[in-house]
C-alpha cells in the first residue's frame, strides 16, 4: 500500500514537471499566455508530491518492508533504527529520490517566495528547473525505480554496507545533495536569464541566496565527509584525492567562484558573463560528480552504482543539460554586456583573478580525475594521486591565497597597491617568519608554504575590520572575514598534519608499550565484544601524553554478518594540539597484535576551519536575507501609505 502510494506520487510529480515545462515554455514565448498563471502553483504541488513519495520510502525502510526490493537489498531487521532511517539514502535509488525531492522543494520555495525578478524571467527559470527535474524523474522511473517489488518476498534483508553504518550517513550525503540542488537552481536562473536576456543586479540578487546556500551545504558536506572517512576507514588520512572525493570538491570550487561573481554583479553590476558561465559550470561539475558516483566506472567506498546502463542515462542527461546550456550561452553571450568597467587594481580585479585561479585549480582536478578513466577505456592502467594533485593544484592555490589576502583591502572600481602597502606589512612579516621557522625545522616545500601563507592569511583576513566600529559591521562583512579566517585555519591544519605527523606500525604483546611522538601507548588486553549486528575484537589501551594522566582507547576489528564484511574502527584521543589515532590489526601466530599509531599535530584545525568557512557563509546569508526582508517591509509600507493617501 505505502509502496504503491509512493510510486503513484512520484509519477504524478513527474507529470506535473512536464506540465510545468510546457506551460513555462508557452508563457516565456507568448506574453500573457493563458497557462502563465499555473506555472507557480504546479511547481508547489510537484514539490509536495515528490516529498510524499520520499516520505513513503523512509517509512518502508523504517518498518523494513522486505516486499520492496530496495529495502531488501539495503536493510535488515536487526539493524539499528538510525541506520534504517538513514539507509533510505544510503543506496543509489534512495539517494536519487532524495535528490529529486530536494529539487522539487527548492522549486516550490522558488515559486512561492521569489518576487524580485520580472515575471517573464521567473517563468523562464521555472521552465529550466522543470526541464532539469524531468530528466531525473525519467531516470528514477525508468532506470532506478525505488519502489520496485520483490516476488517472492525474502525472509530477511541483506543489510547496509557496514562502512555506511555510522552516524555520518545521517547528515553527510544530504548536505551534499542540498548543495548540488542549490547549484541546479543557479543553473536554472542562468538559463532563464539567457532566454530573456535579462542579466543584471536584480537577477544576481535573486540568484545569490541559492548560490550561497548551496555553497554552505557543500562546505559542510565536504568537511563532514572528510572527517567521517578519516576516522571510519582506518588509514589515518583526511583526503586521498579519490575520484568521488574530487566529485564533491569540483562543484565546490566552481560554486566558490560563482559566489564571488554573483556578489559583484549584485552590488556593482559587473562580471555578467562570468556569472552566467560559472552558473553553467557549477551545475556541470555536480552532474559530472553524479556520473562518476553512479555510472559503475569507479570502484570506491563512496560509489553507489555498478550498472553501466544508469551511467549511460546520466551521461545522456549531462550532454543534454550542459550541451544545451552551452549552446544557448554561445548564441546569447554576445547580447550580454559586461556591465560597469573597472581597473585591474580594484576589488573587482582581484575577484576576477580569484575566479581565474579557482577555475584553473578546477581544471587541474578535473583532468587528474578523468584522465585515468579515459586511459583505462583505451586499455592502459594509469594511477593519478597526491604526487600529481598536490603540486599541480598548489601552483594555482598559492597565488590565490595571496589574492585572498590582498583583494578585500582594495576599493571597488579603482585603487592602488601603494595605499594598502602599510596594512600588509604585518601579514608579510608573519609569512616570512613562518617560512624561516619551517625551513629551520626541515619542513618540506608544500607544507612550508602552507604554514607560512596560513599565518599571513590569518592576520590579513581581519584587516577589513580595521578602523571600523565592530558593532556596526554588517553580517555579510563578518561572514567574509570568518570564512577567510576559516581558510587560514584549515590551511594551517593541513600543513601541520603533513609536516609533523609521526607514525608507528608495530606488533606488540599484551602489556607492551610503544612511543609515538609525545605519547606512550600500552596494550592492556584484547577481548571479544558484540553489537546489534556485529561482533568485534576490541583492544583496551592506555595512552599518556608526556607522562601525564593515562587516557583509555578502544579500537576494534569488527565483523558484520549481514552483509558479511570486516571493518576497522579507529580510536581517537583529541587534545588542543592534535590527535592520537589508533587502529587494531590482526593477531600473529606468535601472539602479537598489530597496531598502527599516528600522532597528528593540529589535524583538527582542518575541520574547525571548514566549519568556520561554513559559518561565514551562513552569517553572510542571514545578513542578505535580513536586508531583503527589510527592503520588502519598507516597500510595503510605502505602498500602504500611498493607498491611504489615495483614499
Image: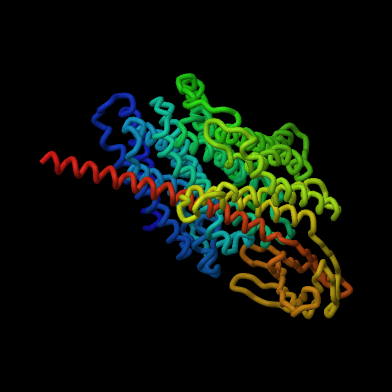
The correct choice, above or below, for 210 with respect to 514 in the image is above
Q: Seen from this angle, which residue lies furthest right?
A: 590
Which image quarter holds the C terminus? Answer: top left
Picture quadrant of residue 225: bottom right
The correct choice, above or below, for 225 with respect to 284 in the image is below
Residue 578 x/y as whole percent = 72, 64
The image's colour scheme reads rainbow
Residue 2 x/y as whole percent = 38, 58
Residue under the point 39% across and 43% down: 107
Residue 417 x/y as whole percent = 64, 35
Residue 572 x/y as whole percent = 70, 68
Which image quarter holds the N terminus? Answer: bottom left
Residue under the point 41% across and 46% down: 106
Q: Between residue 602 and residue 470, name the one nearer to us.
A: 470
Q: Seen from this angle, which residue lies furthest left?
A: 647
Residue 558 at least partly seen: no
Number of numbered markers: 0
Q: Between residue 323 and residue 202, name the one nearer to us.
A: 202
Residue 403 at least partly seen: yes
Picture quadrant of residue 549: bottom right
Image-based side of 328 in relation to 168, left or right: left
The correct choice, above or below, for 584 with respect to 475 in the image is below
Amino acid at each position: 500500500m505505502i509502496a504503491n502510494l509512493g510510486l503513484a506520487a512520484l509519477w504524478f510529480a513527474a507529470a506535473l514537471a512536464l506540465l510545468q515545462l510546457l506551460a513555462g515554455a508557452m508563457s516565456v514565448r507568448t506574453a500573457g499566455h493563458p497557462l502563465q498563471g499555473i506555472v507557480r502553483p504546479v511547481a508547489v504541488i510537484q514539490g509536495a508530491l515528490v516529498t510524499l513519495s520520499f516520505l513513503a520510502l523512509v517509512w518502508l525502510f523504517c518498518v523494513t518492508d522486505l516486499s520492496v526490493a530496495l529495502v531488501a537489498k539495503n536493510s535488515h531487521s536487526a539493524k539499528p533504527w538510525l541506520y534504517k532511517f538513514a539507509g533510505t539514502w544510503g543506496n543509489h535509488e534512495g539517494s536519487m529520490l532524495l535528490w529529486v525531492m530536494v529539487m522539487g522543494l527548492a522549486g516550490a520555495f522558488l515559486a512561492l517566495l521569489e518576487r524580485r525578478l520580472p515575471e517573464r524571467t521567473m517563468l523562464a527559470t521555472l521552465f529550466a528547473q522543470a526541464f532539469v527535474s524531468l530528466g531525473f524523474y525519467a531516470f528514477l522511473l525508468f532506470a532506478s525505480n525505488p519502489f520496485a517489488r520483490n516476488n517472492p518476498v525474502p525472509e530477511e534483508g541483506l543489510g547496509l554496507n557496514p562502512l555506511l553504518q555510522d552516524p555520518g550517513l545521517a547528515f553527510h550525503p544530504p548536505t551534499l545533495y542540498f548543495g548540488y540542488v542549490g547549484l541546479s537552481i543557479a543553473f536554472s536562473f542562468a538559463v532563464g536569464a539567457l532566454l530573456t536576456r535579462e542579466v543584471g543586479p536584480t537577477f544576481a540578487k535573486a540568484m545569490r541566496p541559492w548560490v550561497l546556500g548551496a555553497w554552505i551545504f557543500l562546505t559542510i558536506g565536504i568537511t563532514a565527509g572528510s572527517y567521517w572517512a578519516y576516522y571510519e576507514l582506518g588509514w589515518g588520512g583526511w583526503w586521498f584525492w579519490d575520484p568521488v572525493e574530487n566529485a564533491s570538491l569540483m562543484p565546490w570550487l566552481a560554486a566558490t567562484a560563482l559566489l564571488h561573481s554573483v556578489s559583484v554583479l549584485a552590488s556593482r553590476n559587473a562580471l555578467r558573463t562570468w556569472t552566467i558561465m560559472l552558473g553553467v559550470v557549477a551545475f556541470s561539475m555536480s552532474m559530472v560528480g553524479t556520473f562518476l558516483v553512479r555510472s559503475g566506472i569507479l570502484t570506491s567506498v563512496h560509489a553507489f552504482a555498478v550498472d553501466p546502463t544508469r551511467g549511460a542515462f546520466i551521461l545522456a542527461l549531462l550532454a543534454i543539460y550542459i550541451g544545451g546550456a552551452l549552446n544557448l550561452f554561445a548564441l546569447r553571450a554576445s547580447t550580454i554586456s559586461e556591465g560597469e568597467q573597472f581597473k585591474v587594481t580594484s576589488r573587482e580585479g582581484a575577484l576576477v583573478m580569484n575566479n581565474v585561479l579557482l577555475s584553473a585549480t578546477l581544471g587541474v582536478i578535473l583532468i587528474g580525475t578523468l584522465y585515468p578513466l579515459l586511459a583505462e577505456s583505451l586499455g592502459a592502467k594509469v594511477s593519478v594521486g597526491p604526487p600529481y594533485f598536490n603540486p599541480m593544484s598548489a601552483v594555482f592555490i598559492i597565488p590565490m591565497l595571496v589574492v585572498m589576502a590582498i583583494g578585500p583591502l582594495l576599493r571597488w572600481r579603482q585603487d592602488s597597491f601603494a595605499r594598502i602597502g602599510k596594512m600588509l606589512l604585518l601579514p608579510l612579516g608573519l609569512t616570512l617568519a613562518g617560512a624561516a621557522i619551517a625551513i629551520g625545522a626541515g619542513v618540506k616545500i608544500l607544507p612550508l608554504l602552507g604554514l607560512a601563507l596560513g599565518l599571513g592569511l590569518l592576520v590579513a583576513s581581519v584587516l577589513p575590520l580595521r578602523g571600523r566600529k565592530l558593532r556596526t559591521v554588517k553580517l555579510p562583512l563578518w561572514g567574509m572575514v570568518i570564512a577567510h579566517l576559516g581558510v587560514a585555519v584549515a590551511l594551517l591544519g593541513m600543513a601541520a598534519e603533513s609536516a609533523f605527523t609521526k607514525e608507528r606500525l608495530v606488533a606488540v604483546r599484551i602489556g607492551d608499550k610503544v612511543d609515538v611522538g609525545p605519547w606512550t601507548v600500552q596494550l592492556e588486553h584484547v577481548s571479544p565484544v558484540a553489537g546489534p549486528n556485529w561482533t568485534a575484537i576490541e583492544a583496551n589501551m592506555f595512552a599518556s601524553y608526556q607522562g601525564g594522566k593515562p587516557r583509555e582507547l578502544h579500537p576494534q576489528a569488527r565483523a558484520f554478518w549481514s552483509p558479511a564484511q570486516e571493518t576497522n574502527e579507529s580510536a581517537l584521543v583529541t587534545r588542543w594540539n592534535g590527535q592520537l589515532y589508533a587502529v587494531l590489526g590482526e593477531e600473529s601466530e606468535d601472539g602479537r597484535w598489530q597496531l598502527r599509531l599516528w600522532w597528528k599535530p593540529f589535524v583538527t584545525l582542518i575541520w574547525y576551519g571548514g566549519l568556520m568557512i561554513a559559518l561565514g557563509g551562513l552569517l553572510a546569508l542571514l545578513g542578505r536575507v535580513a536586508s531583503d526582508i527589510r527592503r520588502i517591509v519598507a516597500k510595503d509600507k510605502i505602498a500602504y501609505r500611498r493607498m491611504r493617501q489615495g483614499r
